[in-house]
Image: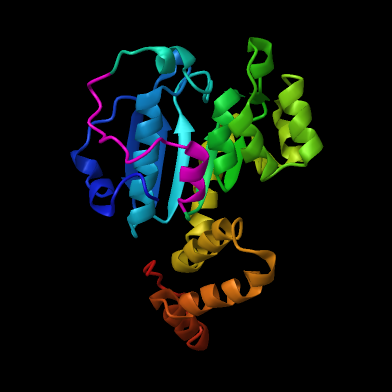
Amino acid sequence: MKLYTKEQALALEQQTFAHLLVEQNGHVLTITLNRPEKKNAMNPVLFREIAYALHYAHFNHEVWVVVVQANGDIFCAGADLKAFLSSGSETNSTIPEPTSEVVLADVFSGLHKPCIAKVHAPVLAGGFLIVCGCTHVIATPNVTFSLPEVKRGLYPFQVMQSMLNIMPSRAVLDFCMRAKSADAQEALRLGLVSEVVAAEELDSKVQALAEEIMEYSPSAIRLGLEAFDALKTVPENDRQLFLKSMLGKAVQTEDAAEGIAAFAEKRKPVWKGK
């Protein structure tokens, strides 16, 4: 996480968001895309706001799980190309400028915390960057996932890379080259979705999943996700030594000491996330 400093990110309560709702309830941070009149298409302001909220989650040890959801009849229609080509700017967002360009896939991979996408409506184009960036995706049966870029003379370059992290390469290329649309069940089969649940069960399922994750050590999970992210750049011959060093970090956490003590004392551990 390099776009905002820890001090900047933890000042979230002082900020005004234009297109995002951010709410922390206990150890769960819920981020809601709130630009329904534009089908939650991501303009530069929304890109910046998502990046800032994820930095807050990354630096705040009290956040153990992140939930990403959306208002409106489209979960996310991708990038707002008109807004990116326009010279105009919005002033009702106080989120500071990042130190460099926001690359959403990198921001999600650098979160190093469980992130659940709560998908109730269609996902298009760059919206895949959010879905692919989450560790879990819970969707309703009516949801579709579409990549229409080649119909516009474009290609989903960044989305392709994010999809390759979780799907077979031929399936990814087929999606990209044929402007393919998949329903929730096909997305489940391909690994794009973790679980499909009835619309009336979506809220309770996401809540139950978040509660289940929080039964386990947030420090262990954070370090595990950090290792998972780092393995992309660690040479293959060095991976076992690197992972051994990560285990050494985990052993030194307060959560590890608590987990071992709770096991010996036959009680439920009380995690601190440290």
Q: Nearer the viewer, residue 161 or 121?
A: 161
- Residue 198 visible within the image: no
What percent of the width, then of the height, locates residue 265?
47, 87
Q: Is 72 situated left or right of 120 in this image?
A: left
Q: Is residue 156 above or below residue 263?
A: above
Image quarter of the C terminus: bottom left
Residue located farthest toward the right when viewing the structure as drawn: 170
- Relative to residue 114, is residue 127 depicted above or below? above
Residue at position x 42%, y 18% from top?
A: 84
Measured along the vertical axis of the image, is residue 223 above or below residue 64? Answer: below
Q: Position of residue 108 (x, y in %)?
A: 49, 44
Q: Quadrant of residue 71?
A: top left
Quarter holding residue 132? top right
- Residue 81 lies left or right of residue 184; in this view the side is left
Q: Residue at x 39, y 77 (%)?
A: 254
Query: Observer-nearest residue: 161 or 41?
Result: 161
* Image-quadrant location for residue 128: top right
Q: Nearer the viewer, residue 153 or 116?
A: 153
For the point 52% across and 48% down, the residue is 109
Please state if 185 lies on the left or on the right of 107 as rendered. Answer: right
Residue placed most toward the observer, 185 or 192: 192
Q: Main secondary structure of the magenta part?
A: loop
Magenta-span inclusion, residue 22:
no
State the image coordinates of residue 188 (x, y, percent, origin top left): 72, 38
- The span shown in magenta is 90-111
